[in-house]
Image: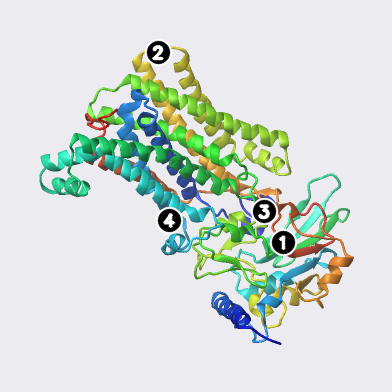
Amino acid sequence: MDISRRDLFTIGGKLLVLASVGATLEQITGAAPPSESYKMAEHWWGMIIDIDACIGCGNCVRACSKENGVPKGYFRTWVERYEIEEGEQPHVESPNGAIDGFPPATRTDLKSFFVPKLCNHCADSPCVQVCPVGATFVSPDGVVLVDETYCLGCRYCVQACPYGCRYLHPDKDTVDKCTLCYHRITQGLTTACCENCPTGARMLVDFKNPQDPVHEILRNNKVQVLKPYMATGAKVYYKDLDGSVR
Amino acid sequence: MIPGVDGFMYPNEVELQWSLLIVLYPYITGLVAGAFILASLERVFRVEAVRPTYRLALLTALSFMLVAPLPLQLHLGHPERSLEMYLTPHRSSAMAMFGFVYLWYLMVVLLLEIWLEYRADIVRLAQSTTGITRLIYKALTLGSENVSTASRVIDDKVGYTVTVIGIPSAFLLHGYVGFIFGSIKANPWWSTPLMPIVFLFSAMTSGIAAVLLLYMATTKVKKVTLDMRCLDTIAKYLFYTFVIDFTLEMLDLIHRTYEADESFRSLDFMVHTRLWFSQVVLQIGMGTLIPLALLAANQLWTFAEAKRRVMYVTACCLTLVGIFAMRWNVVIGGQLFSKSFLGYTTYKVAFVTREGLIPAIGLMLLPFVIFVVLVKLLPPLGESEAHPSA
């Protein structure tokens, strides 16, 4: 194969950019660097959540909290329980984010299901759009991250997120959120929440991987994202999501 | 049950992120924009009747402008990083433009116009005073001591141009603040294209009311005769602006009610409960309908001078309260309901914390301190030699 000087510069430039982004992300996430075989440009991360499989045990919330040192009272992920009586507004609860699961339901004659929530790692993320200094950004592999060494703590992104996924870290005074366990997925592992889900209700997926089961799931199931009318390009897809879920 | 929460809030929503200080930010910038637009009435639109308040309006705008960034600065988790907004602004962010809009307005419009307006007086004062005062005035001349008629004509022409640029700049300043809120699609209480224009007219209303009150106070303190024709004219413009402002706000309300989208039930509940006092009683009742009635009465009937003064003072004080309530209802109200539309939280103002009541009161008093200093330094009510060509 002939490689021209122009091609050489182009490839070299791209590698340089990827290497520097990798180094920056390592610095930002404060975690182990991505494994050498990890190439950001080859991934586009998201998640599939199977509503019918979730049992509301709260394992995911506890695992996330431990893995990421989430401050008490704040949540990178949480689980909601919906209880709906026909023709009525849904009754929703998430006691302490469901970190300890849920108390038994008081009524059994209602439509009831659990909805795990986390950052939707939107492709057209409103939080990224509004950040005045670009401290919030989408990584080349599709994960919305916050550079805590750069964040002003203005909280405009918290207001802009339609899903309530962001909070101001009480000790750092910078905005904090789900990183999709970036320090794990770049090492070839799955997220803490997915790993600890006993029913496989959460599944980390890579849209750029042709072998990933996500393609079959999207092809064969009725899936929906939260608040699709917000047009945020959310990448957390819910299987069998009820229309009442907000 | 979480204390202060009714229904369901997303867990991270319970705590409000934008506090009382963020209420002050649009309130203060609104006063700046409104005061400046009143000043431009005389300079650009040649409304001679309001001339006694021209300089006063500029000094009012400057006093509040200098304080405008402070609530934001105090609110930031990392105020030491705020300079990054200038150095590495994120171009897609509405907020990133604040620094540039602010600097443009402060440096290019306000300071320049005030300096040109006062230049001749500053030169005269630099020659007639002694000691430190003389040094201050000398410095304020910026080395430009030529006060010949020809140079004054140039001052006037440049000043006029600056004011002409200043009017859209004032619109930009406050329309932009409205856009910061109006462009958040995640929040239906904020997300409306009317927001910048509602902010703009409410800014004009509050700024005009503030200048009218400051004019009356300054004449009283300085024992200068109050120009009733000026007062009546300002009150007339306040009335017109207020009518437009109220019409726009009602249009927004009617539109929301008629459209009744999925957020309506939640917002309607909020207005009837948590925002009842601040929105219905303070903003609409006391802060809008009463001052509008007082101002309208003066357009329909002629009252004795003393009565008019009392009516104007009452109307302006209530207007300022009403516009503050409007800012409160936008900023705080927009965070009291869940984006799930299934619940509501509460906001309790802290007292002595960084974003508490005491710093907020301090920040609201600071512009008045600056105003007193500015009035002392740059007398606004004396015979001006400005506008030789006017």
Instruction: Please state which of residues B46 and B246 is positioned toward the viewer in this rendering.
Output: B46
Picture coordinates of residue A52 (x, y %)? 85, 64
Which quadrant holds residue B42? top left
Q: Are marks 1 and 2 in contact (CB under 8 Å)?
A: no
Q: Which residue is mark 2?
A: B303
The secondary element bearing badge 2 is classed as loop
Q: Amino acid at mark 3?
A: Met
> What is the distance, in whole Å, between disc 4 and disc 1 at their CAs?
32 Å
The secondary element bearing badge 3 is classed as loop
The secondary element bearing badge 4 is classed as helix
Instruction: Please state which of residues B132 and B267 is positioned toward the viewer in this rendering.
Output: B132
Instruction: Please state which of residues B103 and A220 is positioned toward the viewer in this rendering.
Output: B103
Picture coordinates of residue B44 (x, y %)? 38, 31
Picture coordinates of residue A125 (x, y %)? 65, 60
Q: Which residue is mark 3?
A: B9
Give the letter of the chain under mark 1: A
Q: Amino acid at mark 1?
A: Ala
Q: Which residue is mark 1?
A: A234
Q: Which mark is residue B73?
A: 4
Q: Amino acid at mark 2?
A: Phe
Q: Looking at the rendering, in which quadrant would you find the N terminus of chain B?
A: bottom right
